[in-house]
Amino acid sequence: MKQAAIVVVMVLSIMAFAQAPPGAQGRKIGDFANVPEARSSTFIYCGSLIDGAGGLRKNVTIILFGDRVKDIRANQVWVTGPGDEPIDLSDHTCLPGLIDVHTHVLLQGDITAEDYDRQLLKWSPEYRTILGTQSARKALEYGFTTIRDLETEGAGYADVDIKKAINAGVIPGPRMQVATRALDVTGAYPLLGYAPNLPVPHGVQVCDGADGCRKAVREQIMYGADWIKVYSDRGYYIDSNPPAGIAPAPALNDIPTFTMDELRAMVDEAHRQRHKVASHATAYNGVHNSVEAGIDTIEHGDYISDADLKLMIQKDTYYVPTLYVGEYVAEGRAKAGAPVWLDMIKISADTFRRAVKAGVKIAFGTDAGGFDWNINPAVEFELRVKYGQTPAEALRSATVTASELLGMQKDVGSIEPGKLADIVAVKGDPLTDISTLEHVDFVMKGGVVYKKP
């Protein structure tokens, strides 16, 4: 009888600890019944949590098992057993790992043609790949646990190898989907302007004709492309009196590259092989032709007509604006003889506002690599809020919406039981001050901590 009483007291004591009020964080209470598995787990105490599936929650414990989230509990008590690991982020806001769907890890800034040409002409592909591994590491440390890298800019299929090295644990970096070499027509993409007898490298794979471009799509997929990227326009200029049907004015017009037959052939071949297509489409013709051809994502989209915004909604086409890089390169390109880039800052901001208002699906992309990788790509967030999104909408574009664009929503984009444990943390509240995302000081990818306060 005495032994039974002792057992009852012990059980009641354990229950009391397990229901400890806020402020009791950090106690190891040895309640093995509450451990999600018999093996060791990780317990992350978050002062606040933005899980991507709802709003802001206070005093939350995230329980991890292996590389995935096991449970989320609305309390401040760590329930740990032998081997379990507690992580104290009680003064932080936890949120899903960020996703950037437009990067170039193999490019190190290209304000002017001279910057770009130097990398292709004077740097070996091997050296550029070494730098690319450092870019990938920086992306992860900035809090981007997943990226879509949209072409190697003349470095062949090196993005496939960087992706493989990350997946094998050889180097640290985010999860990657890659586009390898990208596609453009003859005479439309650098390197250009050199003597015709000089064999110079191209930043893309050149293809012409529907059959030739279909073959190029097959080749890139064969060598490891997750996405096919096409360049749909070039030669931008301000059109104050655009043709009927283009609105609003002034429009940013362009020279289209591929014919509609070529675009449709590339889209058909990629979709037939269950791959998606991203289109560098900056101005009217590039955007319009891409949407008509059934391309999956519009990259940059500095000018999109109202009619094409409606068509994008109908066709479920994603919009990936890159506001910061446009401002970053504008002055240098204007000095180099292309003043239209200064006008494009205002035009792209106006397009972004109209897209937000229209309800187009907007995902987070930065074109990092088009600007120096020592600049945190999260600077893009402030411009998105400045030009029309709420902080919550901007954050969602880099989590839930981006994961859907990548087809990875079952694994990433939110912190929920069963999903990969991709978790970052900041001090402060991104929902009131979006700039806090430029100061991520805790990064976990797949249950592994890569950065901590």
Image (cartoon, rainbow, N blue to C red):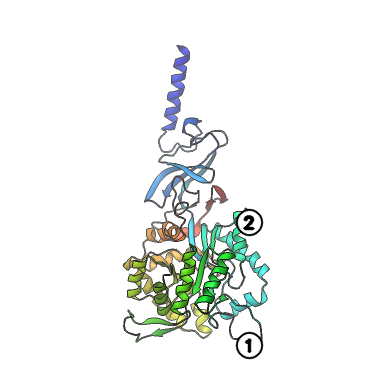
- Label 2, label 1: how many angstroms apart (C-alpha)? 40 Å
Q: What is the x, y in percent for residue 410?
A: 45, 52
Q: What is the x, y in percent for residue 317?
A: 39, 67
**Residue denoted by label 2:** 171
Q: Residues within 10 Å of mark 1 (few under 14, many from 20)?
A: few
Task: Determine the secondary structure under disc 2.
Answer: loop
- Amino acid type, residue under disc 2 in the picture: Ile
- Amino acid type, residue under disc 1 in the picture: Pro
Q: Residue at x 43, y 47 (%)?
A: 416
Placement of 448 over or under 231, stated as above or below:
above
Q: Residue at x 35, y 76 (%)?
A: 305
Q: How crowded is mark 2: few (under 14 residues within 10 Å), some or many (20 or more)?
A: some
Give the camera-side residue of 262 and 249.
262
**Mark found first going from the N terminus, 2 or 1:** 2
Q: What is the x, y in percent for residue 73?
A: 42, 40
Residue 374 showing in the rendered view: no
200 horizontally vs 209: left or right: right
Q: Residue at x 47, y 72 (%)?
A: 279
**Residue denoted by label 1:** 196
Give the camera-side residue of 369 and 290.
290
Q: Residue at x 44, y 44 (%)?
A: 417
Instruction: Please identify the residue farthest to the front as the structure is shown.
Output: 211
Residue 341 showing in the rendered view: yes
